[in-house]
Image: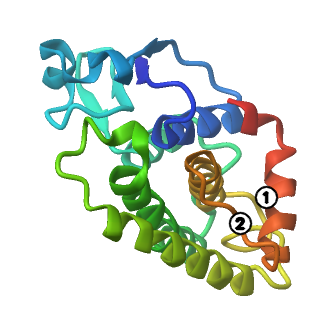
Amino acid sequence: MKLYNTPMPAPNPRRVRIFLAEKGAAIPLVDVALVKGEHKSADHVARNSLGQTPVLELDDGTCLSETVAICRYLESLYPEPPLFGRTALEEAQVDMWVRRIEFQVMSPAGNFWRHAHPFTAKVVVPQYKEFGEANRGAYEKAVMWLDGELAGREFVAGDVFTMADICALSSVDFADWTGLKVPEAAGNVRAWHARVSARGSAGA
């Protein structure tokens, strides 16, 4: 088993690396350089027809893509510590928060990156810069919403670190890299970010 990976600042492969680090599991990494177009090579497109990373290749050659699907599979192999919850309710809550983070936080960050950042100008044609810039405000609004949700709790989905925190951390850090900052007023998000960034897995 091996993981086709792209190093920082790519947010999605980092999710899987953090997940593995939390599990104490080691899987060989094969780096795919996006800047060199390696993700669009025939070999990689055969693994993932969308030409994206990460991709988990199993020993029998089966390939899994999409971070949550990969991490769900890894959860079955490495059940401790549980990162998708222990009970049916906890699992549903983690899934709810993963979706919320993807749609509310990561989506505007991704739109800003694709349509307003100079690095993507030659890749995303045409760029809709006005739309991209509009996502700056959408991201800040989402972070302030998350700030309210984090009032009185340590982690995104409750009292323990889960996949929801992994998704949120990778999203906020990626947004920061693109130039989208957490508002000063978002004290709960800032405190949460400090907590999860202090975990050893955050450097994965």
Viewer-side label of 2, 1: 2
Determine the residue positioned at 64% across, 25% down. 25
Q: Is residue 88 visible?
A: no
Q: Are marks 2 and 1 in contact (CB under 8 Å)?
A: yes
Q: Which residue is mark 1?
A: 193
Q: Is residue 107 left or right of residue 149?
A: left
Residue 147 placement (x, y as % from top left): 73, 80
Determine the residue positioned at 79% across, 52% down. 196
Residue 57 placement (x, y as % from top left): 32, 22
Q: Is residue 169 left or right of residue 107?
A: right
Tell me which corner region of the image, top left, top right, bottom left or bottom right, holds residue 48.
top left
Q: Label 2, label 1: how many angstroms apart (C-alpha)?
A: 10 Å
- Disc on res. 182: 2
Camera-side residue of 78 and 70: 70
**Could you tell me the amino acid type at mark 1?**
His
Where disc 1 sits, the SS reads helix
Where disc 2 sits, the SS reads loop
